């Protein structure tokens, strides 16, 4: 099957509600593809998702009604190549025409004419969008989200914030120090001529995805993880022999950081609301050589009813996900203002429930993979106004991590950070009663 047919199929799945990372991984398992073919599919697949509003706008500018889904996706891919990749224009048009020809001469002529017409008008149309500052089309960012970004970062930083979210992400992996060392991993990279783009403690951003297929990855010596989520878990400061709770823990990346910090001594209760995610946590812990984790199915809102109190709690709550748009661009088309309001309420409920079962003197991390202040600073501020026994504690953020502290002392990894996921982290301590 042509790689473009595969990409067209994957785009259709995401349009119908599937998660981009899952359908892409499934495709790589289903089809025999070379490394070059995988790279090309990844580029055009995510490229279309990141720029879907722009591509559909340009298609509508140059066509009438398109009834067949595959034709729209073929045009999306082709226009993406013609606009955002250094592809040979004639080659792109020819290939699209040949694909369409298999469905009839009339369709092939339609595709050919549409793309040639786009090429004639492309520069003028793009200039017009820039002049009008039509970011909703130009960068495929919903207007309400543009408004949120402008409110949070100011109009002078809006363009930079939008462009930051559109960057192509690098693969990041963390060294599992229970099985491996950073020195061994760096030697592994050197032998394969893989470059380190950025390093945050034991998390490495690299310029090759091939290590996911390596023996070291399969044996649990390295684990796929972003440095942002790593820092959330690291800052909890879990110690050996403590009783630690990890809320909404699946798939277990942050749980593994906690276990490593605890030297695999003590006990971690890792909860998730879904049974299949409990199994995922258990499988990952086994792979990583961790045996202090007990995975449990539980609604995080009811965690205060389970009967135990904890030394440390990681409260990484369900969120809108706007901090991981680089990796999951479809979020821009599936979320809205109402989702944020509902999530903020849920997050506060979970945080209060967790706070009830933290020991006096215990510490808690509240974190999200979103940049929305309503889910971050505003939520924590509401919590602190009600729970006077909690105080903010200083975080340890490495110097090579960019972002900003909020008025409470929480840290937002935001548009200033070139490589890592956007994330919010704040540390709270429950003062001992006199």
Image: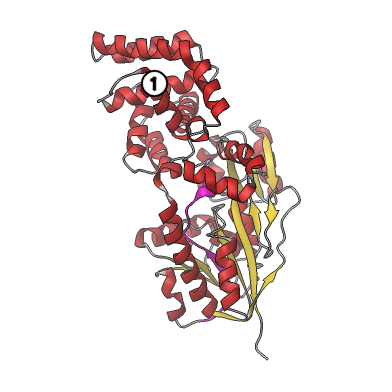
- The answer to whether residue 352 is above or below residue 150 is below
User: x and y percent of residue 59 in the render?
Assistant: 38, 22
* Residue 269 appears in the figure: no
Q: Nearer the viewer, residue 337 or 414?
A: 337
Residue range of the region highlighted in magenta in the rendering? 309-325
Write the residue at 65% across / 41% down.
157
User: x and y percent of residue 240 in the render?
Assistant: 64, 72
Q: Residues within 10 Å of mark 1 (few under 14, many from 20)?
A: some
Q: Nearer the viewer, residue 413 or 335?
A: 335
- The answer to whether residue 54 is above or below residue 118 is below
Dot 1: element: helix
Q: Is residue 111 left or right of residue 426?
A: left
| Picture quadrant where residue 334 is located | top left
Q: Nearer the viewer, residue 184 or 145?
A: 145
Give the labeled residue for mark 1: 61
- Assign the C terminus to one quadrant of the image: bottom right
Write the residue at 50% across / 24% down.
36
């Amino acid at each position: 099957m042509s790689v473009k047919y595969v990409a067209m199929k994957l785009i259709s799945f995401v349009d119908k509600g599937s998660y981009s990372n899952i359908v892409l991984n499934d495709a790589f398992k289903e089809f025999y593809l070379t490394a070059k073919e995988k790279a090309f599919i990844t580029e055009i697949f995510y490229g279309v998702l990141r720029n879907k509003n722009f591509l559909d706008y340009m298609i509508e500018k140059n066509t009438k009604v398109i009834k067949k889904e595959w034709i729209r996706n073929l045009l999306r891919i082709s226009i993406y190549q013609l606009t955002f990749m250094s592809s040979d224009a004639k080659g792109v048009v020819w290939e699209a025409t040949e694909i369409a020809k298999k469905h009839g001469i009339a369709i092939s002529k339609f595709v050919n004419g549409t793309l040639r017409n786009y090429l004639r008008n492309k520069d003028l149309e793009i200039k017009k969008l820039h002049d009008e500052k039509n970011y909703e089309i130009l960068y495929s960012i919903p207007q309400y989200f543009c408004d949120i970004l402008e409110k949070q970062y100011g109009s002078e930083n809006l363009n930079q914030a939008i462009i930051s979210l559109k960057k192509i992400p690098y693969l990041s992996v963390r060294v599992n120090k229970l099985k491996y060392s950073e020195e061994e991993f760096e030697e592994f990279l050197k032998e394969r001529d893989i470059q380190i783009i950025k390093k945050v403690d034991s998390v490495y951003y690299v310029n090759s995805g091939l290590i996911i297929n390596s023996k070291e990855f399969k044996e649990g010596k390295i684990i796929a993880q972003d440095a942002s989520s790593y820092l959330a878990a690291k800052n909890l400061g879990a110690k050996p022999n403590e009783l630690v709770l990890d809320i909404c823990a699946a798939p277990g990346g942050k749980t593994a950081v906690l276990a490593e910090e605890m030297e695999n001594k003590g006990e971690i209760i890792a909860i998730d609301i879904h049974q299949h995610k409990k199994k995922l946590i258990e499988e990952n812990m086994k792979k990583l050589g961790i045996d202090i984790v007990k995975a449990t199915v539980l609604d995080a809102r009811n965690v205060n009813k389970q009967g135990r109190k904890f030394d440390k709690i990681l409260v990484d709550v369900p969120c809108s996900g706007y901090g991981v748009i680089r990796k999951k661009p479809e979020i821009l088309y599936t979320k809205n203002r109402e989702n944020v309001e509902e999530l903020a309420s849920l997050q506060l409920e979970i945080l209060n429930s967790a706070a009830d079962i933290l020991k006096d003197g215990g510490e808690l991390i509240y974190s999200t993979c979103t940049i929305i202040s309503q889910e971050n600073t505003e939520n924590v501020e509401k919590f602190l106004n009600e729970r006077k026994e909690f105080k903010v504690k200083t975080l340890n953020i490495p110097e090579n991590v960019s972002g900003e502290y909020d008025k409470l002392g929480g840290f937002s990894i935001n548009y200033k950070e070139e490589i890592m996921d956007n994330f919010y982290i704040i540390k709270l301590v429950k003062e001992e009663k006199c």
